[in-house]
Image (cartoon, coloured by chain):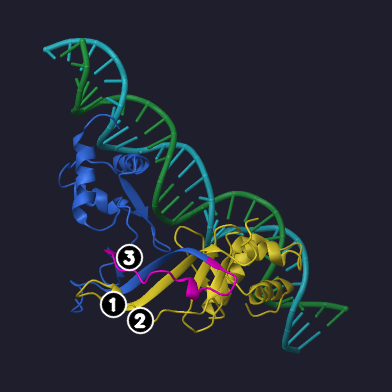
Chain colours: A yellow, B blue, C green, D cyan
Amino acid sequence: MERRTRQHEAILDVIATAGRPLLAQEVLDLATSHVPSLSLATVYRNLKALQSEGRIKSVVLPGQNPRYELEVHTHHHYFQCRQCERVFDVDACPGNLQMMAPSGFRVEDHEIILYGRCKECGDGR
Amino acid sequence: MERRTRQHEAILDVIATAGRPLLAQEVLDLATSHVPSLSLATVYRNLKALQSEGRIKSVVLPGQNPRYELEVHTHHHYFQCRQCERVFDVDACPGNLQMMAPSGFRVEDHEIILYGRCKECGDGR
DNA sequence: TCACTAATGATAATGCATTATTATTAGCAA
DNA sequence: TTGCTAATAATAATGCATTATCATTAGTGA
């Protein structure tokens, strides 16, 4: 990806602006308003390139397709709304969870996913 | 699944004995020692039946194929060893994580996955 | 503006876990 | 033991996200 194309710009812009991890399909849907002719193949091509350049990273929730967000090298977690199914970043962290593991097991990292209602869906619509 | 077959017995036995969630392929590998002719299709067929009967449940870690364990209706979490890749149950739980969520978000449930070294792989083999 | 060629768009192909198909095997009731 | 048919074994088919192909479009340096 050496040349600066409208498609590339739109894809990166959409991810940077969203403020939450997006599915490839969501990236396509959102970026299509900038570049109507955008193809899903181009989205995948760019996601792959951006990822290998370390500009974005993939976020995978159990049983779901990968989502993509800007790479920030800070430890964080995720919240998924059961209503709108969107995923949001969560900065809080309970810290080391070594105490949760059975004796003899060494905990090196952890992943936490919260499920519930996001702010917008909170009233039950 | 009305009839009691050797295959069915072997599959359920392997899951009950393992004490940890098993991949379909692991179920096949382990149960094959009981029933050498066992087919992967039969494993899938039985997993599906056992699941719809509520006898087992599937455990899905991000980006991985589903694993299966006996259904116990107690809230628990998982630990995956980075060395042997096996998954273990973790009974401990930090409790309600509402405090982790951004304001306005309601947390209804959570999932925690610990990663590290299991007891057997702890010494670095 | 031109030439070169990277990137795109459209779509076919892939990879792979899971499911369907079908001939065969084997529970189980009589 | 026999007959019925559920379950199995082997393998082809599916579903679907992602990747490859290739003709066309459009950046970019000269």
Give the residue pinned by disc 1.
A99
Residue type for callout 3: Tyr
Q: Please determine whether, in this image, residue C7 is positioned above or below residue B5.
A: below
Segment tinted magenta in the rendering: B89-106
Residue type for callout 2: Asn
Give the residue pinned by disc 2.
A96
Q: Is residue B2 visible?
A: yes
**Residue A97 sits in quarter:** bottom left
Q: Give coordinates of residue A32: x percent, y percent.
A: 73, 64
Q: Is residue B113 magenta?
A: no
Q: Measure the alpha-carbon separation of dots 1 and 3.
A: 13 Å
Out of B30 and B67, give the one closest to the viewer: B67
Give the residue pinned by disc 3.
B78
**Mark 2 crowdedness (10 Å alpha carbons): few <14, some 14-19, many ≥20:** few
Picture quarter with the C terminus of chain A = bottom right
Q: Is residue B99 magenta?
A: yes
Whether residues under marks 1 and 2 lie with C-beta atoms below 8 angstroms apart, the answer is yes
Residue type for callout 1: Met
Q: Give coordinates of residue B29: x percent, y percent.
A: 22, 51
**Residue B48 sits in quarter:** top left
Q: Give coordinates of residue C7: x percent, y percent.
A: 66, 72
